[in-house]
């Protein structure tokens, strides 16, 4: 069964002014659509066709560049849209807040760590908040479209929050100012969704 481009859970202009409309249109309608169709082309006629995307990523043959890049791109963007919301921002509460405080001392400590992971990733990639069995959280980053679900990539936990730091994610509005884009991302994080993923994954 072929993978399908998921619909955005909000309008293209819903994340303004933090993420601009044109970037959202191109990012979802061109980039994510491209990863989706190239993933389908790469798995067509192989035994991966019947597998879930999580299965494909977890058991990834890292030498298979087409599946690695496009399977990662398909999954990463599918997660990315859902962890943002026009009603987002603020701070997590409950057990996710406890796990973040336990790992990083405070929410501000987490923000600093996450912004650093996003800011120091050289070239293209992603910053992540992952959860390990038992509930411990960890910030890490991966290059290109790699993902912590892949073998020996990043912190090898389950990703519950991801930030795309490819230039296509921010260049139209922020040009070379990646740190400004990262700070704007904190204004739209959908902590309700991230908390739900935390509870399901820990
Ligand atoms: Mn992208």
Image (cartoon, helix red, strand yellow):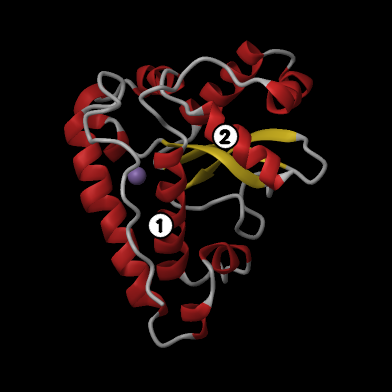
User: Foreground: 106 or 167?
Assistant: 106
Give the CA separation, mark 1 to mark 2. 19 Å
Q: How many marks?
A: 2
Residue 2 lies, in percent from the top left, at 37, 74
Residue that appears at 71% across and 23% down: 94
**Is disc 1 surrounded by few (<14), some (14 to 19) or many (20+) residues within 10 Å?**
many
Residue 29 lies, in percent from the top left, at 22, 50
Q: Which residue position is annotated with label 1?
A: 74
In the image, the residue with mark 2 has its CB under 8 Å from the nearest atom of ligand 1: no
Locate residue 34 relative to residue 156 in the image: left or right.
left
Locate residue 133 relative to residue 77 in the image: left or right.
right
Is residue 61 shown above or below 57? Answer: below
Q: Which residue position is annotated with label 2?
A: 194
Locate residue 195 relative to residue 34 in the image: left or right.
right
Is residue 131 shown above or below 41? Answer: above
Residue occupying the far bottom of the picture: 45
């Amino acid at each position: 069964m072929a993978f399908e481009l998921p619909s955005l859970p909000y309008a293209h202009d819903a994340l303004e002014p933090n993420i601009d409309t044109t970037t959202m249109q191109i990012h979802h309608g061109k980039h994510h659509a491209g990863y989706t169709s190239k993933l389908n082309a790469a798995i067509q006629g192989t035994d991966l066709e019947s597998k879930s995307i999580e299965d494909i990523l977890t058991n990834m043959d890292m030498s298979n560049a087409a599946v690695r890049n496009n399977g990662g791109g398909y999954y990463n963007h599918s997660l990315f849209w859902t962890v943002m919301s026009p009603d987002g921002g603020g701070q997590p509460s409950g057990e996710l807040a406890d796990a973040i405080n336990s790992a990083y001392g405070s929410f501000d400590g987490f923000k600093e760590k996450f912004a650093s992971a996003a800011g120091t990733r050289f070239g293209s990639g992603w910053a992540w908040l992952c959860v390990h069995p038992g509930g411990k959280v960890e910030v890490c980053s991966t290059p290109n479209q790699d993902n912590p679900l892949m073998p020996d990539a990043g912190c090898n936990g389950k990703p519950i929050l991801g930030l795309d730091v490819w230039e296509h994610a921010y260049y139209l509005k922020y040009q070379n100012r990646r740190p400004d884009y990262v700070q704007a991302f904190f204004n739209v994080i959908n902590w309700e969704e991230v908390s739900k993923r935390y509870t399901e994954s820990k």
